Image: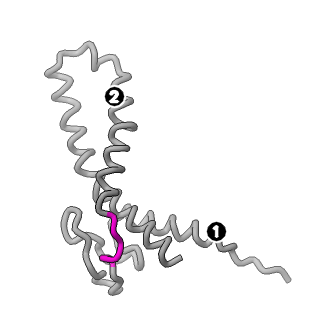
């Protein structure tokens, strides 16, 4: 009879994906039930569902860094390829792109910070 248990690398990869998924949903990385944040980016020190210490994961500068990276490379760069940016009146361009950029820029940091905390949880407990 052969052992079919997952190898340690597969276990850690699954744990990282689990932490990422829970972080993207802004839930406690340990149980997936409790809220991870008590405000916009303020981490709930202790999970209300399982009591896990979420304050131990320091992801303070990761959210702005990755937000700038994503916005700059995956949003601004492709927008510059569209010809309407160069040919349309500047007022129209600003009126259409700035609100969308503001929404994306303000919406990403909690999701990214949650994902970083999820990965930190997976690496430290895996």
Residue density around tag 2, few if under 14, some if 14–19, many if 20 or more, within 10 Å: few
Decide: few, some or many residues near mark 1? Use Cα within 10 Å; few <14, some 14-19, many ≥20: few
Task: Relative to 62, say whether 102 is above or below.
Answer: above
Could you say where residue 41 lies in the image, as x and y percent from the top left? Answer: 23, 63
Q: Which mark is residue 10?
A: 1
Residue at which label 2 appears: 79
Splitting the image into 4 quarters, where does residue 37 fall?
bottom left
Quadrant where the N terminus sits is bottom right
Q: Is residue 112 left or right of residue 122?
A: left
Whole-percent x and y of residue 110?
A: 28, 59
* Mark 1 or mark 2, earlier in chain: 1
Q: What distance separates the C-alpha of mark 1 from that of mark 2?
A: 38 Å
- The residue segment tinted magenta is 54-59
Q: Which residue in the rendered view is the most extreme toward the right? A: 1
Instruction: Report helix, strand or loop for mark 1.
Output: helix
Please tell me whether residue 118 belongs to the stretch shown in magenta: no
Where residue 104 sits: x, y (%)? 27, 45
Q: Residue at x 28, y 83 (%)?
A: 48
Task: Tell me whether the residue at label 1 lies in contact with that at label 2, contact meaning CB atoms closer than 8 angstroms.
Answer: no
Quadrant of the image occupied by residue 56: bottom left
**For the point 51% across and 66% down, which residue is it?**
16
Tell me if 91 is positioned left or right of 19 in this view.
left
99 versus 83 height, above or below: below
Q: Quadrant of residue 45?
A: bottom left
Q: Position of residue 11 (x, y in %)?
A: 61, 72
* Residue shown at 56% from the left, 68% from the top: 14
Left of 57 or right of it: where is 15? right
Residue appearing at x 35%, y 86% in the figure: 50
Give the left or right position of residue 2, taking residue 123 as reference: right
Is label 2 in a helix, a strand or a loop? helix
Residue that lies at the very extreme toward the left in this rendered image: 91
Q: Identify whether 85 is placed above or below 40.
A: above
């Amino acid at each position: 009879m052969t052992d079919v248990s997952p190898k340690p690398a597969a276990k850690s990869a699954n744990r990282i994906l689990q932490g990422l998924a829970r972080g993207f949903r802004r839930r406690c990385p340990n149980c997936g039930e409790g809220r991870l944040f008590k405000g916009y980016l303020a981490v709930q020190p202790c999970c209300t569902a399982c009591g896990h210490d979420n304050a131990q994961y320091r992801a303070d500068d990761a959210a702005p860094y990755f937000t700038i990276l994503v916005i700059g490379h995956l949003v601004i760069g492709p927008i510059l390829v569209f010809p309407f940016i160069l040919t349309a009146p500047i007022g129209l361009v600003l009126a259409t792109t700035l609100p969308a950029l503001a929404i994306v820029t303000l919406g990403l940091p909690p999701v990214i910070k949650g994902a970083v905390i999820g990965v930190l949880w997976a690496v430290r407990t895996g």
